[in-house]
Amino acid sequence: MLSKRLKRVADYLQHPVYFADIGSDHAYLPCYICREDPEAKAIAGEVNDGPYNRAKKTVEENELTDRIQVRKGNGLEIISPKDLLNQITIAGMGGKLIRSILDKDKEKLMNVTRLILQPNIDADLLRGWLVNNYYHIAAEEILEEDGYIYEILVADKVNEKAVLTEKERLFGPKLLMERNKVFLKKWKSEREKRIKLLESMKKAKQVPSDKIAHWEKEIQMIEEVIS
Ligand code: SAM
């Protein structure tokens, strides 16, 4: 059964569905979509042998080889404009890695109108990249599953650069407006983590003052948002 996290990612794919799932591992997401929607097509991308072989096996077992291609390669290098796909999912990695995957082959995104991203950490880095690259954050979700909290960012290509405030970048413009229970739980815990980090930085004494000021500012922003 597909995780609640990946089901929520799947919900944001637009019809007709033809997408690439980068870092697909078992290819559970493309297989789920193609089982649910007989018109859907997908490309599952994987850089590592183990997950690549797992993806091929799942696609074969589901008898979906005619609609899901499994390709081996680094990030977006496995797609080409000839594929004519317009949506990409990247889930279950850190925000820094997702950002580097997107940034490395930006020209591959020319026809991509929607990105559905699920960073495990550092969602703020991705938000910054998205607005700088003409994507508007159309939707955001925060959810808890098996004791972990996940964020999902849905970004659509636009002609004009959007602007995010510092707070919107850190917390997410949609999540900030909603401030639901999971959001408050996450940021209470993030506040504790930053306070501990700041204490150890201050003890270390050799930490540059701008780094300390950065964490102090984030703690202050978190307190304003969760109070
Ligand atoms: N997307 C699935 C999910 O959300 O459950 C799998 C997430 S798994 C933790 C991350 C996968 O990304 C791994 O299978 C890894 O091999 C793959 N990966 C990491 N860097 C990648 C890259 N640059 N290009 C393609 N795949 C990558």
Image (cartoon, rainbow, N blue to C red):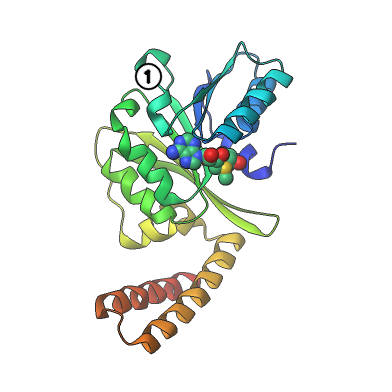
| Residue, far front | 49
Residue 194 shown left or right of residue 80 in the figure: right
Task: Residue 25 in the image: state x and y as whole percent.
Answer: 59, 35
Picture layout, residue 110 above or below residue 47: above
Circle count: 1
Mark 1 surroundings: few (<14), some (14-19) or many (≥20) residues within 10 A: few
* Image quadrant containing the N terminus: top right
Residue 165 shown left or right of residue 41 in the figure: left
Q: Residue at x 27, y 50 (%)?
A: 163
Task: Residue 198 in the image: state x and y as whole percent.
Answer: 41, 81
Nearer to us in this view, 87 or 69 = 69
Task: Residue 39 in the image: state x and y as whole percent.
Answer: 60, 13
Task: Residue 44 in the image: state x and y as whole percent.
Answer: 54, 26
Q: Residue at x 54, y 34 (%)?
A: 12
| Residue, far top | 66
Q: Residue at x 37, y 49 (%)?
A: 127
Q: Residue at x 46, y 59 (%)?
A: 176
Picture layout, residue 9 above or below residue 196: above
Callout 1: SS: loop
Residue under label 1, please give it: 80
Q: Is residue 52 visible?
A: yes
For ligand 1, tell me if the residue under mark 1 lies within 8 Å.
no
Amino acid type for the residue under numbered disc 1: Ser
Nearer to us in this view, 57 or 101 = 57
